[in-house]
Image (spheres, helix red, strand yellow):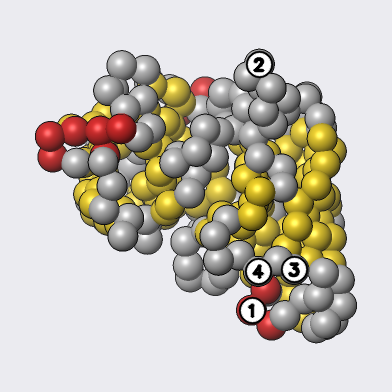
Amino acid sequence: DVVMTQSPLSLPVTLGQPASISCRSSQSLVHSDGNTYLNWFHQRPGQSPRRLIYKISNRDSGVPDRFSGSGSGTDFTLKISRVEAEDVGVYYCLQGTHWPWTFGQGTRVEVK
Amino acid sequence: EVQLVESGGGLVQPGGSLRLSCAASGFTFSSYWMSWVRQAPGKGLEWVATIKPDGSDKYYVDSLKGRFTIFRDNAENSLYLQVNSLRAEDTAVYYCARPGDPGSVDYWGQGTLVTVSS
């Protein structure tokens, strides 16, 4: 199975400052169809996850443009350009290239 | 509006069984792959299983194969997860999720809690 490793696991942030989360996979996430199925989700306490980014860098409708995804192969990053209070919670990466799909452990973002 | 509403969770004894259901609306259910994802209390997300639109192919996390079965009824716009031989470590919120795009999940239900305890 593909192992997804996120870092850091806890990220204290200052409102208005940037933040960055890394997600590394144990093997390449490039699919035979040429796409890379790497996703990012945000989950607030007591809520279902919400997708932010799919295929590395495509932002979902309604997701603020302060969120951006980048990377390739086995190394991916989610960046928040200026953290707002509503961004606290846990962020997960998910690879959908190889069966079984696998999530990262999650990164908890909290305000300092 | 896409809606996924899970039901069927509850308290069950170790070794017991449950059938979880997901009622889908707001999209053409029979055209979409569907998945189950679970989350143990205070833990991260774990993908459980995915099924093709016509039910012909199913994919499972290896550790649950043989105990969990995903299936669907396209006439009823419903997704199911049969869970057998339940263990304490199966205690989790089980989410119904729609892979609207290949290799991804774009909609989630609110989840149904399964608690395995004597």
Q: CA distance from mark 4 to mark 3?
A: 5 Å
Say which label, 4 or 2, has the lower sequence index.
Answer: 2
Label drawn at residue A86 = 1
Task: Name the quadrant containing residue B56.
Answer: top left
Mark 4, chain letter? A
Mark 2–mark 1 Cα distance, whole angstroms, equals 37 Å
Residue B70, quarter of the rendered image:
top left
- Mark 2 vs mark 1, foreground winner is 2
Q: Secondary structure at mark 4?
A: loop
Local SS, label 3: loop
Question: Do the residues indicated by labels 2 and 3 lie within the same chain of the protein?
Answer: yes
Query: Is circle 1 on the same chain as circle 4?
Result: yes
Query: Along the polypeptide, which appears first: circle 1 or circle 3?
Result: 3
Q: Residue at x 50, y 44 (%)?
A: B105
Say which element carries label 2: loop
Give how far apart the Cα atoms at labels 4 and 2 are.
31 Å
Q: Position of residue A38 (x, y in %)?
A: 67, 39
The amino acid pointed to by label 1 is: Glu
Work out whether residue A108 or residue A72 is closer to the camera in this orientation and state it: A72
State the residue position of label 4.
A64
Residue A60 percent across, percent down from the top left? 58, 56
The amino acid type of the residue labelled 2 equals Ser
Q: Nearer the viewer, mark 1 or mark 3?
A: 3
> From the viewer's perspective, is B5 left or right of B100?
left
